[in-house]
Image (tube, rainbow, N blue to C red):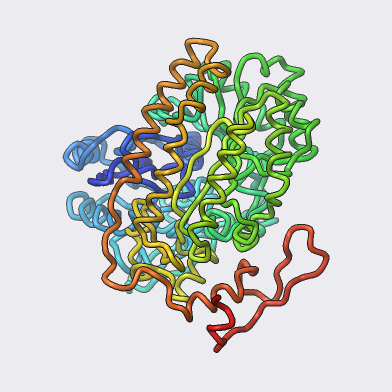
Amino acid sequence: MKVMVGFPPTQSSLGTPLLSQNRQFQYFNKPTFLYPVVLGTGATMVKKAGHEVIWEDAIAQFLGWKEYDEIIERERPDIFLFETKAPVVKRHWQGISHMKEKFPWMKIAICGDHVSHLPGETLENSEVDYVINGGYYDFAFLDLVEWLNEGKSGAPNGIWYKDDNGDIVENGRYEFYKDSNKNINDAPFPDRKLTKYLNYQDEFNLKGRPQFYIMSARDCAWGKCTFCVWDHALYPKGAYKQRTPENTFEEVKHLVDNFGAREIFDDAGTIPPGPWLKKFCGLMIESGYNKKVMYSCNMRFGWVDAEMYKLMKRAGFRLLKYGLESGCQKTIDKLDKGTDINKVFEHCKDAKDAGLTVHITMMVGYPWETKAESMEVFKLADKLMNAGLVDIHQSTIVMPYPGTPLYAEAVKEGWLRFGETDYEKLAMDQPAMKNMEMSPEEIQGLCKHNYMTYLKPSYIWHHAKSRIRSWEDVKYTFEGVTALFGHLKDFSRKPEKSGKSEILTPGQTARMLANVHNPRQELVAIKPGAKEAIPHKVVEEIKISSQIA
């Protein structure tokens, strides 16, 4: 079969969509493109199975429908696979209609977190042929292509479609069953030439060029954060898989030897800790590849100790990206993040003492945080930066994506500013949830306030004095400056009016605060360091005056 994989045109007046390899969707004034690891692996799998594969990413290649139509007409693929997310799924439904009208012979398959949570929705609202349910859509897509090629009956596990009567055939989630003889280590390294890796070099957090994204695990060993759609829609409880450290190292070696990789970012939700990380570091050091490439990754506070940070530095690690999310412990607990705010200084210091670059991410717009509480995260970030314990910090607006516990609670409690299926409003260009006291404009302004930190003379002087030591550092700094002004534009947009009150009612606030300790409104919640569980308070009618002072 002839197969096309990539992304269709997804233009917007809001900017360039960051759709690939992105847990939280956002439009950017300054385009950034992350390599879509699983999609790239899927294209490679199908090619290795003997099928002809073409890769066309309209977003990274800046293609409109005219150019994309010409490619499809010229190449005439039998099937096209692309990934979607909630903020653009309706636009993709329209794109599917466009392609089906012009190219009725081409089958279309779609994957991603939103359609994994609601696979039937896209089948009901578009002319798509197949929806892949689950985060291992590379393996599932190969099964789909082989099934279509062989013409057998009964679609593979995880593939949803409509039968001849137009009824949706629900086919579960794609998983590695014990009798399947499949393993995540069986996945080939993505064919970087096939997938046009040079289109994915605009990533301003990484210093080395060329740079490459890989994933040592899918996705996060913690896997509990209530806002993370990958934790709950793509890789829910029981779906987490690690590659072996040996297999991961072999990909590092492959990228250095064959492509001259200067920096690699491991985009597993967080890098596997403990014996896995120790073994991987040992392989990097013993082989000498710690001297050939910089390695960066996502990290959790408290995941490793000071000695492990030192080992990571010896192994060639450069940047660690932490999700701080908030400066309030009650918010951290509500998100089920598992972080102790009081130990953040210690963890950052351990990493910095080892010589590592520390990057923290923060979010604002939580319904239960006052403005003063929201400012705590910026105060904490300022203290960390002034102490030289954090090098980079970025902020965004929290988005409640369908499939997450946060979204379920927002719908149930009436926190959403818009309708529950107004997915396009989850594009991070404006707050999606109401707050107990702040307007959407105030929340938007908080993100902009964060980025203004980089313009302070004290930060500029510290950066110039301690971090610019080479021409590579100069280029890295320039990229950071252009990204900064892009972010200032991103959060300068005016939120649209929802047509209703933008502040939570006293009743909503009271119910929210009564259970702010509990991530999922389950029977119990356990705070970090607590010896006993906290019972969930079933609150139907409560005395508002006693909850709001």
Residue 519, above or below 352? below
The residue positioned 50% from the left and 42% from the top of the image is 38
Measured as percent of width and height from the top left, residue 516 is found at 60, 69
Measured as percent of width and height from the top left, residue 533 is found at 77, 70
Measured as percent of width and height from the top left, residue 284 is found at 71, 22
The residue positioned 77% from the left and 18% from the top of the image is 286
Say how many tags the image has. Answer: 0
| Foreground of the two, 471 or 462 | 462
| Foreground of the two, 74 or 360 | 360
The residue positioned 47% from the left and 10% from the top of the image is 471
Residue 472, above or below 246? above
The residue positioned 38% from the left and 34% from the top of the image is 32
Residue 204 visible in image: yes
Q: Which residue is at the far front?
A: 549
Judge left or right: residue 11 versus residue 319: left
| Foreground of the two, 513 or 65 | 513
| Foreground of the two, 503 or 336 | 503
Which corner quadrant of the image does residue 425 belong to?
Answer: bottom left
Measured as percent of width and height from the top left, residue 2 is found at 35, 40
Residue 201 visible in image: no
- The N terminus - image quarter: top left
- The C terminus - image quarter: bottom right
Q: Which residue is at the far right?
A: 531
Which corner quadrant of the image does residue 165 belong to?
Answer: bottom left
Residue 88, above or below 193? below
